[in-house]
Amino acid sequence: MFDGMLLGLETAFTLQNMFFAALGCFIGTIIGMLPGLGPMSVVAIMIPVSLQIGDPSTTLILLAGVYYGAIFGGSTSSILINAPGEAAVVATAFDGYPMAQKGQAGKALTIAAISSFSGGTIGVILLMFFAPALANFAILFWSAEYFALVLVGLSAISAFAGKGKVLKALMMTLLGLMLATVGESSLFHAPRFTLGIMDLQSGINFVTLAMGLFAVPEAFFLAIDKIRGKKSSSNKSQEISNLRINLKEAKAIMPVIARQSVQGFLIGVMPGTGATIASFLGYAVERNLASPEERKEFGKGSIKGLAAPETANNAASTGSFVPLLTLGIPGSGTTAVLLGAFIALNLQPGPQLMQDRPEVFWSIIMSMYFGNVILLLLNLPLVPYIARLLLIPRSFLIPFVLFFAMAGAYIGQNNATELLLLLGFGVLAIIFRFADYPLPPLLIGFVLGQMFEDNLGRAMRNANGIQFIWERPMTLTLIISAAIFILVPLIRDWLTNKRK
Amino acid sequence: MLDLNRAVALALLAFSSGYAYLAYTYHLLPFELFLSVRPNTMPLALAVGGIICSLFLLIKKQSPENETEGDGTVNRADGEYLKNPQNYNWFQGIALLVLATFYALFLRSLGFLFCTSTFLILGGILLGERRYTLLISISFTASILVWYLVHEVLTIFLRPWPGWFY
C-alpha cells in the first residue's frame, strides 16, 4: 500500500497535476457559487473540457478539484445570500446566514472553509486506509437501514421546533414530504399529483423550491426594511470581513469537526445516501449533543451548527469515492457522473483498478488531499473580499439576489414555468414567515421525502410488511435513535411551556 | 377571530384535504392493488397527518409572538412587520416581486440579455438608485458576463436575443 501511496504522490505532485488540481478547485468554487449549478452539474459540464487533456490521472485530478470547489462554492451563496443552490448545503444556511446577518460573514466563511478542509482531509485519510474494508461493510446496508437513516436525518427538524413551534415545524415537514411526492418516483414510475401540468411530470425542482423558500423572501424583507440585518457599528467593513476565530470558538468546533468527519465519511460510503443526509444528520446529532445553552443558538447563528454540516458534507463527498473506486458502484449523483469520465478514459473502476492502474488509483486519492489544501489556501485569502459582497448598496444587492435565484432555477431547465413556480413559492414563504412558520423543516421534508418513500417502499416490499423494523437490529437502533432525537426536545419544550 | 395564523392553518387544512382527496381517488393499476406499498400509501398517511396537524393549529391557543433577537442586529421577527406596517416600504417589496413576475413572463420571448439588464436596471431604480450610468453599465456587464459563462463556457443554451431577432 505504501508503494502505491508513494507512486500516487509522485504522480499527483508534478507541476502539471498541481496546476490542474488548483485550476479545478478555482473553477468549481466560482461556478458552484451560482445557485442551480451543484457539484454534479459542474462536474458533468467539465467532463468534455477535461477529456481534452488526454492523461487520465490529470483529467481525474482536475475533476476531483472541480468537485471539491463546487461544494465549497455552494456554501458561499448559502451563507451570504441565503440561497442554497444544492441540497447538501441547505443545512449550512441554517446557521451560516444568521451569522452573516449578525455581521460575521467573514467568520462564517472561515469556519466553512476550515470545516470543509478538515472533513475532506480526514475523509481522505480514512479513504486511504479503510477503503476496501468499508466497501464490504457498506453493501450490508439494505433499504430498511437507509429508510431508518433518512428518519434520523429528518430529526434535524427538531432544531426549528422551539418556542411553541412544534406543531408548525411538524406541519411544514409534512408539507415538504407532500411536495416531494409530486411527479414520478423511482419506485412507481407513474406521475402523481401533477394536476395534468406537464412541467410537474418530473416533480418539483429542488433549486426552484429552495430559492423560492429562502432567497425570494429574503429579497422581499430586505426591500421593505432598509435597516434589516444591519449592525450599528462604526467599523462594519472590518467586522464583516474579519476572519478571526478565537481560541474558545476553535475549541468548541474541534470536537464537532472530529465527530462529523468520521460520521459524514461513513454515511458517504453507503451508496445512495451521500452528502445531503450526512449534513442533516450531522446537524441533528450535534444539536442533540450540545449543552442546553448552545442548543438555543442552533438556527440563529451557532458556530457548531455551521461547522457540523460543512464538515459532514465534505467528508461524505470523499466517502462516496469508496464504493466507486473499490467496487465500481457510484455512491452519489456526482460519482455517477465521474464514473462516466472513468469510462470515457477507458478505465474501469473497481477492485482491479488498484492492481492494473495503481498510479491512477493512488494519484486520485493523493490529489484529493492536495485539492483540499489548495481549496483552503485559495479560499481563506479570498474570504474578506467575498464577505464584502454584503456591503454592496441594497439597490444593487437586492435585484442581484433575486436575479441569481431566478437564474439558478432557469439555467439548465430553460423553462419559464420554473420561474413562476419559484415566485409562487416565494410569496407563500413570505406569508408563512409572517405567520411565524419555520421554513427549513419544509425543505428538509422535501429533500429527504423521495429517499424516505423509496426506501420505506422497498423495505416493505422485501419484508412484505413492516416487520423489518424489529427483525433488523440496525434498523431498530436507528429508528429508536430518530425517535429519541425528535421526541426528547419536543417533550422538554412541552414541559417547559407547561411549567410557565 | 380569524387572524393570520389561523388563516394559514385553514389554508393548510384545505391543502391537506385536497391532497387527501387526490391520494384517495388515485387510479391504481390492477397489479398495484396487490402491492404491500401502493403509490398512494404514503400520500394517504401524509394527508391524514397534515389534516390532524392543521386542525390542531386551527384550534390551538396562539403563543406570544417571537421577540426581537437581542444580538445587536436589526433583525425583526417577521410577524412584527404586520404590527406597524406604516414603518416599512411595502411598495418597494411588492413592486420588486411584480417586476420579477414580468421577468419570468418575458424572459423567453425577449431574450436573456435584454430581459436581465432591464430587470436589474428597473430593480435598482425602484430601490432608489439614481446613479444611472453606473447602474446601466453594471447591469449590462453582469448580464453579458453571466450569459457568456453559461452559454459560451458551460455550453448551456440560453437565448440571448428575442426569438424573432434571429
Image (cartoon, coloured by chain):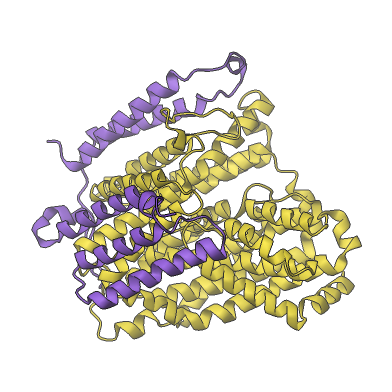
Q: Nearer the viewer, residue A55 or A303?
A: A55
For the N terminus of chain A, give its image quadrant: bottom right
Rendered purple, the chain in question is B
Q: Image height check: is A401 above or below A166?
A: below
Q: Nearer the viewer, residue A105 or B104?
A: B104
**Is residue A310 something one can see in this rendering?**
no
Residue at the image point whose x is 60% and y is 31% from the top:
A187
Q: Is residue B7 left or right of residue A326?
A: left
Of all residues, the one furthest to the left in this rendering is B86
Q: Image height check: is A251 above or below A290?
A: below
Residue at the image point whose x is 28% and y is 45% from the top:
A498
| x and y, in percent, of residue A2 in the image | 87, 73
| x and y, in percent, of residue A332 in the image | 65, 51
Q: Is residue A216 left or right of residue A228?
A: right
Q: Nearer the viewer, residue B142 or A223?
A: B142
| x and y, in percent, of residue B4 in the image | 19, 42
Q: Image height check: is A142 above or below A463?
A: below
The mark tally for this picture is 0
**Is residue A284 something one can see in this rendering?**
yes
| x and y, in percent, of residue A133 in the image | 80, 55
Rendered yellow, the chain in question is A
